[in-house]
Image (cartoon, rainbow, N blue to C red):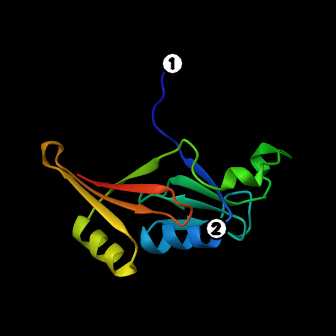
Amino acid sequence: MHVKSLDHVNIRTTRYDEAVAFYRDSIGLQITPPPTAKDISNSAWVHDASGRPIIHLVRAGQVVSALGSMEVDDDAAVGTGPLHHVALDCADYENFRNHLEASGRELRFNDIPQAGLRQIFVRDPNGLLVELNFR
């Protein structure tokens, strides 16, 4: 028995439209409706470059159909609780940095030459720290 990898992160948010725009426009990920929805009005899958959904965005107060009739408390959609950040493996550091700087978002940078790693940190509209890793 073993875990192969992280499959996805689910973000329930009261700032849904802003979150969709952030992951699409600032981070450059593809947004599609989940298989159970006709559009992205209340939920969206956020895909990596290979087309795999890595983040599921859900408007706070919505029932997730895969969970049946299970309701989720809207309070869980505020803040990040014990979750500190989500890290994404990225490419094209200079263009990514220029794009994010032009967006006016607050950014932090970190370089770890011993690991061949450059990082950009940015917060999504929910306050969740997003770590962008470039190797």
Q: Amino acid at mark 1?
A: Met
Q: Quadrant of residue 45?
A: bottom right
Q: Secondary structure at mark 1?
A: loop
Give the label, 2 or 1, closer to the camera. Answer: 2
x and y percentages locating residue 116 in the rendered image:
16, 48
Question: Of callouts 2 and 1, which one flags the residue occurring earlier in the amino acid sequence?
Answer: 1
Q: Residue at x 34, y 66 (%)?
A: 107
Q: Do residues under tags 2 and 1 come within 8 Å of each other at their CB atoms?
A: no
- Residue placed farthest to the right in the image? 69
Decide: few, some or many residues near mark 2? Use Cα within 10 Å; few <14, some 14-19, many ≥20: some
- Residue placed farthest to the top in the image? 1
Q: Residue at x 78, y 49 (%)?
A: 73
Q: Quadrant of residue 44?
A: bottom right
Q: Is residue 23 left or right of residue 118?
A: right
Q: Residue at x 30, y 69 (%)?
A: 96
Residue bearing the label numbered 1: 1
Q: Is residue 130 above or below residue 1?
A: below
56, 128: nearer the viewer: 128
Residue bearing the label numbered 2: 15
Decide: few, some or many residues near mark 1? Use Cα within 10 Å; few <14, some 14-19, many ≥20: few
Q: Label 2 to label 1, Cα distance in Å?
A: 38 Å
Q: Residue at x 72, y 66 (%)?
A: 42
x and y percentages locating residue 32 in the rendered image:
60, 66
Q: Amino acid at mark 2?
A: Arg
x and y percentages locating residue 48 in the rendered image:
45, 58
x and y percentages locating residue 74 in the rendered image:
75, 55
Q: Is residue 75 left or right of residue 107?
A: right
Q: Quadrant of residue 91?
A: bottom left
Q: Secondary structure at mark 2?
A: loop
